[in-house]
């Protein structure tokens, strides 16, 4: 018998899906996974990127979907890499980011969850302030080994409870509250 899901997470990133699935389970939402590369426009706006990806995902699969787009915004680099975070990670990685920074290491992670079905297109965003560490710490994925949330001494990669405080958690919590009451 096939599994029954409330909606589907569309992404090419297994890590994002697993985090979203684990977080949404705590709210009673069953999340399926449709692994797919989605159209990612080049834009200075995370909102624009997320909306386009959600429309693309719904067009491809014709099922209620959510997508997540996020960005790491580093203050001393004028918000870079921001909406280009995925590309920057693939090209210069964490070592490249660390090499760009000197003293001001303030940063924030922003997450946007966008839901799309045949009549609704709705986004939910959240941010988490922090700093960029001076070296990579822990065994995480993406920027987790270099991002230290505000009021913490550990990077996301060193934490056991990342999913209870991350930018993604906060955005998914907003989404869940809306979804369960829509």
Image (tube, rainbow, N blue to C red):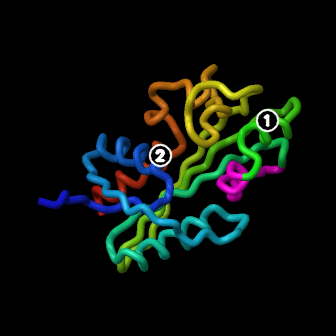
Residue 4, image x, y percentages: 19, 59
* 74 relative to 157, above or below: below
Residue 166, image x, y percentages: 52, 38
Label 1 CA crowd tier, 10 Å (few <14, some 14–19, many 20+): some
Q: Which residue is mark 2?
A: 15
Q: Image point 35% across, 42% down: which residue?
A: 22
Q: Which residue is mark 1?
A: 98
Q: Image point 39% across, 59% down: which residue?
A: 9
Indicate the secondary structure of the residue bearing disc 2. helix
**Residue 181's quadrant in the figure?**
bottom left
Q: Find the residue positioned furthest to the top.
A: 153
Q: Image point 42% across, 61% down: which residue?
A: 35
Indicate the secondary structure of the residue bearing disc 1. helix
* 52 relative to 88, above or below: below
**Nearer to the camera, 125 or 25:** 25
Q: As drawn, is 104 to the left or to the right of 17?
A: right
**Residue 6's quadrant in the figure?**
bottom left
Q: Find the residue positioned furthest to the right.
A: 102
Q: Find the residue positioned furthest to the left.
A: 1
N-terminal-most mark, 1 or 2 = 2
Badge number at residue 135: none
* 145 relative to 59, above or below: above
Q: CA distance from mark 1 to mark 2?
A: 23 Å
Residue 70, image x, y percentages: 59, 53
Label 2 CA crowd tier, 10 Å (few <14, some 14–19, many 20+): few
Q: What range of the chain is rendered magenta?
A: 78-90
Quarter of the figure with the C terminus: bottom left
Q: As drawn, is 55 to the left or to the right of 87?
A: left
Does the stretch in magenta take in 31? no
């Amino acid at each position: 018998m096939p599994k029954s899901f409330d909606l589907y997470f569309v992404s090419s990133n297994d890590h994002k899906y697993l985090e979203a699935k684990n977080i949404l389970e705590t709210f009673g939402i069953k999340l399926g996974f449709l692994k797919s590369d989605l159209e990612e426009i080049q834009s200075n706006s995370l909102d624009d990127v997320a909306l386009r990806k959600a429309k693309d995902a719904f067009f491809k699969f014709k099922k209620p979907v959510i997508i997540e787009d996020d960005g790491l915004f580093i203050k001393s680099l004028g918000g870079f890499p921001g909406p280009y975070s995925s590309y920057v990670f693939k090209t210069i990685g964490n070592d490249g980011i660390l090499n760009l920074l000197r003293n001001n290491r303030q940063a924030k992670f922003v997450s946007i969850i966008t839901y799309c079905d045949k009549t609704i297109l709705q986004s939910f965003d959240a941010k988490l302030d922090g700093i960029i560490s001076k070296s990579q710490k822990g065994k995480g994925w993406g920027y987790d080994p270099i991002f230290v949330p505000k009021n913490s001494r550990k990077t996301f990669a060193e934490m056991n409870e990342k999913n209870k405080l991350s930018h993604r958690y906060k955005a998914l919590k907003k989404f869940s509250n809306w979804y369960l009451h829509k």
